[in-house]
Amino acid sequence: MQEARIELLQLMPVFGGIRADILQFLLDLCPIVSVPTNEFFFRERDQADSMFVLEAGKASVLKSWRGHDYLLRNLKVGDCFGEVAVMDLCPRSASVRAIEDCTALRISAANLHQVYARDLKQFTLIQMNMGREVCRRLRNSDNWLFSVRMEIPEANVKHVFLAD
């Protein structure tokens, strides 16, 4: 089972290039959490110190606005989520709800700090990979926002996006 988890992690952008012994070390530290269908991994504005790697099931990333939850994206096996909170130590920017029974590896900032203490180069690579993944998502969001702005008359854009 651990070999399958290591292989799953090695296929993910956040853990690309990380040695198997470091991933095994991390797996030994991190708990596996189970979240039943329609329950939340976490909610928007919760305090946060961990990220998750989805091992089984599907989940949805939701953003709340005016009392309603809106779907940002769906997550599948192998996706990670919550890494922004590990990087910026701020409250959660969105909620994640299981749409099927899920199991996930929970990796806390403290767990990553233990990797730092064990192997600085591997820790640095994880941090760089996390930064790249967040930048990739930001680039995709920028492209999406730009395409939406180009399709909406300028008068409505200021209202929709609350621009200055």
Image: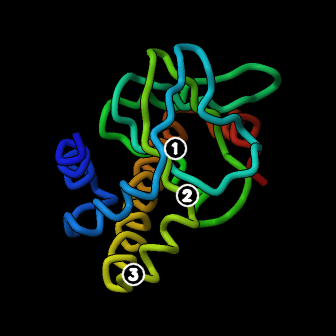
Dot 2 falls on a residue whose secondary structure is strand
Q: Is residue 130 above or below residue 70?
A: below
Residue 138: x, y in percent? 47, 55
Q: Is residue 6 above or below residue 102?
A: below
Between label 3 and label 2, give the one nearer the viewer: 3
Q: Quadrant of the N terminus?
A: top left
Task: Name the residue rendered at 45%, 80% in the picture.
Answer: 116
Quick one: label 2, few (<14), some, or many (20+) residues within 10 Å?
many
Between label 3 and label 1, give the one nearer the viewer: 3
Q: Which residue is mark 1?
A: 145
Quick one: label 3, few (<14), some, or many (20+) residues within 10 Å?
few
Label placed on residue 23: none
Task: Name the residue rendered at 78%, 54% in the picture.
Answer: 164
Q: Which residue is mark 2?
A: 108
Q: Nearer the viewer, residue 154 or 101?
A: 101
In terms of image quadrants, where is residue 87?
Answer: bottom right
Quick one: label 1, few (<14), some, or many (20+) residues within 10 Å?
few
Dot 1 falls on a residue whose secondary structure is helix
